[in-house]
Amino acid sequence: MFQGLEKGQPNRTTWTYRYTLQNCYYFNDRSSVQLTSPLNGIPFLIQSVSPKEEINNGIIKISFEFSYFDDYSAVAYSKNDLESMIKKNLNNRVEDIKIVYKDIISIDEVKEILSSIRSEDTYLNAAIKGRTPRIKKSYGISGINIEVDYCTTKEQENYVDETVDFIVSKLVNDDMSDHEKQKLIHDYILNFVNYSHTNDYNDPYSALYHGETKCNGYAMLTYKMLTAAGIENIIVTNEILNEIENTIDIAGDHAWNVVNIEDNWYHMDTTWNNEDKKGYGFYGYYNLTDAQLIQGPDGLEGRNYAGIDGISCTTNYIDELEAANDENDGKYEHILRALEKTKNYVQINNDFKTYPSMNLLYNEVLLKEGEELGLVDPIIPLEIYKDSFHWSTSDSDVVEVTDGVITAQEEGVAIVSAQAMFDPLFRSSLFCIVRVIPEESDDATTQNLSRQNFIGFTDENVVPHVAISSSDNVNNTMVTNISDELEGKMHFYGEPIEVRTDTELDWMEVSFELRNKPIIKPDFETRNFSIVQGGGRKNTDVF
């Protein structure tokens, strides 16, 4: 039997282990000798073994010189262990997963484990863009290597988790029902996220950090926010992925959420409910049944959907909400009215942009490091809101806030909230997205003036038009935005002005004025931008 074990010195990937045997026969079947457990706690897989023997004073000494693969991170002793380890690595966004499995396993068995993990965790499934499993087998042991491509890094996922926890903690509270929480989360996403027309943005990090994403990012952010609010939901697609064959059985390229409200499941699609413009959308794809989704609600477009085992969406949500509204003395009347807007895009809920006693001047700002900006209209005395609102930031390393004045600290994106301290109606907080760029950046720090602060357009369907003039011939261009000069900063309502011309411009002057009557003809003599359609007011008060 083995009397002792002596480890030799390392030589690259080759180690020498000497076993001393006494009173034993010569090994004829040298290949039967194998090591079946990690030495010194280091996971490894044997690549090759070279046994050598010598006889000295009647003692047979056999040494085994072998090379091995030692870049594995863990050892699994059962399939349950293996599944847990793979899932842990996936959640940590490990791109090259390497695990030693203490038995022989096939590539199909590994794919089945991956399929089980992805079906049980639909958020994780949505985060995986691709995966390639491989197996090395050696002396009854399997080395499993899975290369994974994710849509986010672990650092980005940490940002998503921290930011979502901050938003949801300020957006909803324990006194709200799931009906109220769901609608606020849906409306928040429509107000602060744009649909992206580039494949670079298709994840929740892009939605929060860059303010735009495709459907996968919408669904993942919706999942995170609903989950943080305690609402069960999953992410579904109109495609079925066969892990074993690595093929898509049903063609499709869209993702959305299935949500559990009061023990009933519904389809909610924040992507298709959102117009290609922040703050605008409708409720056409809000809490639908399977049949409504497939056929298309109220004449809207339907879609392919194969269903999910164990989950059926068969309950009419409006019927359920109307019954709940009757039982709660009209508590959900405002939600019912909003859900009637299912065809034409309208301005979405402003509960987190306006408050009876205070509005924020901006809902999104861009600042350089070290810059300061007041979020509250300076004509409102500080004493009015100083002790009635609690100001907080999702990341004080990026931006600090004191009594409505924000100070940019370092590059990044953070969210500032103003939460009413004494509100019997338990309204949502007010929110402002703050993007901080380096101090030496050449970019201008233009701000988006909140729509509710643009006074004079009482009809939400009225769009201001601007005429453009310059030193050269530029065709009059209609743009849906207006700019104003406030405290030396250039502020924008809507998107920045875009001027297209075939001629080279020597100069361009930007200015405007609000008048009671529209200007029929632009003033080319003074080279101004002029409002040619819309309404306004005569005085020059700050908005």
Image (cartoon, rainbow, N blue to C red):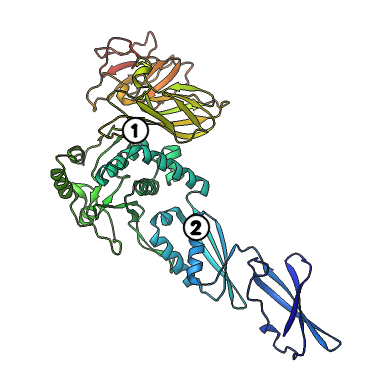
Taking depth in this image into account, of 177 and 130 the one nearest to the observer is: 177
Above or below, 411 against 521 in this view is below
Identify whether 425 is placed above or below 266: above
Q: Residue at x 86, y 87 (%)?
A: 57
On residue 429, which mark appears? Answer: 1
- Give the residue displayed 48% in from the left and 55% down from the top: 91
Q: Where is the C terminus found, in terms of image quarters?
A: top left
Residue 104 lies, with reference to residue 260, above or below; the image says below
| Crowd band around label 1 with a 10 angstrom C-alpha radius: few (<14), some (14–19), many (20+) | many
- Tell me the element at label 1: loop
* Closer to us: 516 or 84: 84
Outermost residue on the right side: it is 57
Image: 56 above or below 343: below
- Assign the N terminus to one quadrant of the image: bottom right
Q: State left or right for residue 466 relative to residue 18.
A: left
Q: Does dot 2 land on a helix, a strand or a loop? A: helix
Q: Mark 2 belongs to which amino acid? A: Leu
Residue nearest the observer in this picture, 39 or 140: 39
Give the percent coordinates (x, y) of residue 115: 42, 65
Name the amino acid, label 1: Ser
The image shows residue 151 at horizontal and vertical percentages of 47, 50
Give coordinates of residue 265: x percent, y percent.
Answer: 25, 55
* Residue 74: quarter of image: bottom right
Give how far apart the Cα atoms at labels 2 and 1 are.
35 Å
Is there CB contact under 8 Å for labels 2 and 1?
A: no
Q: What percent of the width, then of the height, locates residue 213?
A: 40, 43
Q: Which residue is mark 2?
A: 90
Left or right side of 310 for 49: right
| Residue ID at (84%, 89%) | 58
Q: Is residue 292 left or right of residue 73?
A: left
